[in-house]
Amino acid sequence: LGEIKLEDNSIILYPNPTSMDINISSENIINSIEVFNSIGQKVYQTNIKAKEKTLDINSLSKGVYIIGVNTDKGYSRKKLVKN
């Protein structure tokens, strides 16, 4: 059996929808952030050790993305709309 991962519900994404930058914040330390497009391809990944991060999403096409955030308390997925 695989490891059971808890979901971290303290993740906040703003502004959403957006066309420029997205701010990601958490009560817990963020270890990594992944961005997936609408067909599930990973289009961005970064490793950090902070409670806040601003991502420049200018290079992404308009559409819907899933932001995966891995913290010390678990993993969370959030929907992002790029205008």
Image: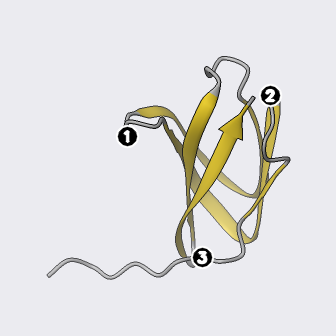
Tell me if 36 is positioned left or right of 13 in this view: left
Tell me if 37 is positioned left or right of 16 in this view: left
Q: Amino acid at mark 2?
A: Ser
Q: Earlier in the sequence, mark 2 or mark 1?
A: 2
| Image position, residue 35 (x, y; %) | 53, 41
Q: Residue at x 72, y 75 (%)?
A: 10
Confirm or deny contact between disc 1 and disc 3 (CB under 8 A): no
Circle number at residue 8: 3
| Image position, residue 32 (x, y; %) | 56, 52
- Mark 2 surroundings within 10 Å by alpha-carbon count, few (fewer than 14), some (14 through 19), many (20 or more): some
Which quadrant holds residue 11?
bottom right
Which quadrant holds residue 31?
bottom right
Q: Would you place residue 78 above or below residue 6 in this image?
A: above
Residues under labels 2 and 3: Cα distance?
Answer: 26 Å
Which quadrant holds residue 60?
top right
Residues under labels 1 and 3: Cα distance?
Answer: 21 Å
Q: Would you place residue 6 above or below residue 75 in this image?
A: below
Circle number at residue 19: 2
The residue labelled by disc 1 is 40
Q: Amino acid at mark 3?
A: Asp
- Mark 1 surroundings within 10 Å by alpha-carbon count, few (fewer than 14), some (14 through 19), many (20 or more): few
Q: Would you place residue 66 above or below residue 51 in this image?
A: above
